[in-house]
Amino acid sequence: MVNRITIWLISFCLGALSAVFWPRLPSKIELTILCTLCLLPILLSLYSKHINNTLDTLKGKAGKGVCFCGLVLSGCVAGALVEASVGYLHYAWQLPNDKIQKEITIRARVLKGGCVPSDNILSEHDSTCEKSYKYLVKFIAFEPKVSPYNRTETESNAELLMGKKGLLTSSTYTFVKNADVEHCLHNGDEFTAVVKLKPRYSTQNPVGFNKQMQLLVDNVHVTGYIKTLHSASVTHKHSFRLRMAAVLHTIDIQNRIWWQALLVGIRVNFDKPHWQLLQVTGTGHLFSISGMHLGVVAAYTLLLSAGFLLIASYTKRVVKALISMLRLPHWFAALHLPLQFSLQEAHTLTPVFAIKYRIMIIGAVWVVCGFYAALSGLALPVVRAFVLLTIASVFSLLFIAYRPIHIATAMVAMSIVLFPLSILSASFYLSVCAVFYIWFLTTRFRTENGSRFKTLLLLQLLLGVFMAPLTIIFFNSLSVAGLIANIIAVPVITLLLPSALIILLILTLVYPSKVGATDGGAVDNVYQMAESLFIYLDSALSWLLSVLRYIAHYDWAAINIHIDSKVAACLLVCMMVIIAPPWRYKRHALFVLIIPLLAFYIPSNPDQWKVHVLDAGQASAIVVIKGERAMVIDSGASYRNLAYTASSVLLPLLKREGVEAIDIIVHTHKDNDHAGGKAALASSPLAQNAMWFSPTKNCELGRVEQWEGLAIHFLWPKAGNTINNNDHSCVLKITDGQRSVLLPGDIERTTEYAILALPNSKTNLKADVLIAPHHGSNTSSTDVFLKYVAPKAAIFTQGFENRWQFPAKAVTLRYEALNIPYYMTSFHGYLTISFPADSHTYFNQITTGFTVHSQRFDLNKRWYLDARYPTHLLLSLKSH
């Protein structure tokens, strides 16, 4: 029976996980068919005993095969139905178009991302404000005492958004009633604010962080920013977890930020050096409350509770003597009944007492771990581990015979049922695979028979090796130092965590009394003693961090690896097959799995060239690649000295494509949305020998550069130009003699007319692909300019729901009137334009000579990465 349930649960998990690859959600007809397929095998499985007997009589093994297939089919269909229903439920509500990017007044509660109170943790107005914040909030109803400016409108907004989640960005807040005071919000605070919202959305590129998918995992429906925060409306509701984090500010320790991450899971104050240290050393899982931390707490609780019962067994006679001597009532003796029996005596007397001891120990572990899970803010990895603990506890209490695979399967299935969208997050696969690897490695190598130290060392090394392909898939990096760092850090954190957690609990409970207590009192002494102990622990953590920093400074500590996720998955399976026990077709399986790994090293066609238009938001970033060389035209924007597009998308894309060097870098003009990544490119080893172009340097009318068999014609500005703005943008045309791309930067209509007036402008401007001037502004893309260029395709590099409403409706009408198909990076995502050496290789290149593929519709079409058409263009269509 257990095996049959396990088979069904495995099928359920596989069916649910298939949703990761769906290009769209199933239609209503498909859902009906799935429901029918799901119910029929379930009915068969209910009467499996009678059916099996009948089928065994009729067909023997064939009958069991039919039942097995029905069981697997029902599980797969059930898992698919769960994910499909959750997907439809999430998309059932969408932010109305008339509310997008409009000022509305909302009431919300901060769930995550708030700052930590620093000094007086009991003050209602205490706050810290060092930087901007991103708050994960839940919209709530207005309280009766709250009276916004337009009550009717705000009440309708509250009713519209109530219960939904949003991600709100804010810079330094200026309160309406006190413009001289800067504030930030804390987790749990409720506030009223004027915000601008837009639907859950983000850029889509083949590399880099997928924010749109992560927002769906967090069940976020809208994003936006806080324009005005009403200070009088803020209600502070500090949780016990936040109070613990705030108490850390009262202790004179060096590693306060690290302790907040380790003990209460708050990492909002981490900056770039902190994240880099965790990434390079592969210890990010240690400084956030995860399943490992819950396991440590469970282990210590188990040891302490078992030790307490062991000690209690030796106090039996003492308790009896006290009861007899003090003549205590019988009900008092009854309360101490568990103390009167040792574990051995419980087994020898009656099974009832053995069960009671089991219940007491498991109950203590479950309660403490439940409190710890709540303390973590119910983080998904911790909840998954708590589900695993609960299932194992139930199996143990009910004396159900089970194997690790049974518990692991039940845990994964329960996690999918409780958090269906978590299958889209990296933490789900990292947590599940870590548990599976530990079970597999301990079973395969029978580690219980060897030395404990060697066992733990071997297990940690093998776990690091087997987790490497997963880190490559999700983070495009491999922490070599992590193999050493984790061997040192895991034992230290295992020892520090319970001690520091108990001391912090004492400090948090004592602090309110300590504030009003006199010096030298009992409360003050307890607080000082606990504080001294915590300072000693902080010294140990300082030593650990110094070791991690020492390991991280080596060049080999971390390696950036950009390979296809399918290749990494094959590598992972190949590693599993290698250490698996011998079986008949093991060599054949290894041969099949090695083929994709070898395909990774096949060089690209050196005669083919591609233009990669990155989805950089309201910015421009374009890469031309031929063979192993690259040319960059604009590098995206930079915000708060962070050039995300250049550092996290453009450069990783070049590495993934096998580019060895950047030869030419062109910034069409100095605006941040085009040249924001200049510093990031300059610091890259790929651009050490690059030639730089700008409107005031090297980019001048009439200049032609030969590069990898391509000709780069510079059409603007004129020689001697000293102005670096939109109208003097560097205009260039890249051609192989047959196909060409025109990149005009942000030129306006006056510059378009000036270029048209130049000699041979009709020949020079004609191109197959046009990057639309100035992101589709109505001040560019004049009719005469488009007629001269006569492109077969145009691309608008613009951001989703940008405040300038690019591309302008009038501009898109001009392109449509001239039958020019156009693409928008906000709608299509990242675009790649391929120019093969033989233009007749592909059927759709007979007329165009090139192919265009988009990230959202061709390269990675997924139901959870839906494309949204610009609202202002939709409204214009409806008005007509």
Image (cartoon, grey):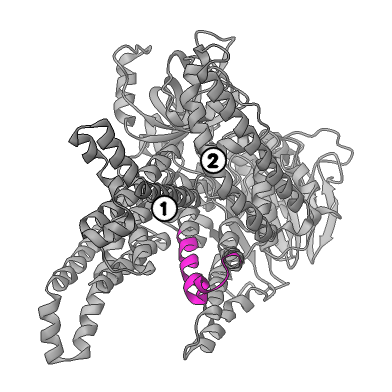
Viewer-nearest residue: 828 or 465: 465
Q: Is residue 843 left or right of residue 54?
A: right
Q: Residue furthest right?
A: 720
Say whether marks 2 and 1 touch (CB < 8 Å).
no
**Mark 2: few/some/many CA within 10 Å (<14, 14-19, 20+):** few
Of mark 2 and mark 1, the one earlier in the sequence is 1
Q: What distance separates the C-alpha of mark 2 from that of mark 1?
A: 21 Å
Q: Can you give x and y, in whole percent of width and height, for residue 252 in the image?
A: 65, 26
Q: What element does badge 2 sit on?
A: helix
Disc 2 marks a residue whose amino acid type is Ser
Q: Can you give x and y, in whole percent of width and height, for residue 250 in the image?
A: 59, 23
Residue at horizontal 24 percent and vertical 69 percent from the top: 74
Q: Can you give x and y, in whole percent of width and height, for residue 728 in the image?
A: 77, 37
Quadrant of the snapshot with the N terminus? bottom left
Residue 857 visible in the current orientation: yes
The disc placed on residue 376 is none
Question: Measured along the vertical axis of the image, is residue 448 above or below residue 868?
Answer: below
Q: Is residue 602 left or right of residue 617?
A: right
Residue 451 shown in magenta: yes
Residue interval drawn in magenta: 432-453
Disc 1 marks a residue whose amino acid type is Ala
Residue linked to disc 2 = 499
Viewer-nearest residue: 84 or 201: 84
Residue linked to disc 1 = 385
Q: Can you give x and y, in whole percent of width and height, for residue 169 in the image?
A: 52, 30
Residue at horizontal 68 percent and vertical 72 percent from the top: 604
**Mark 1: few/some/many CA within 10 Å (<14, 14-19, 20+):** many
Q: What element does badge 1 sit on?
A: helix
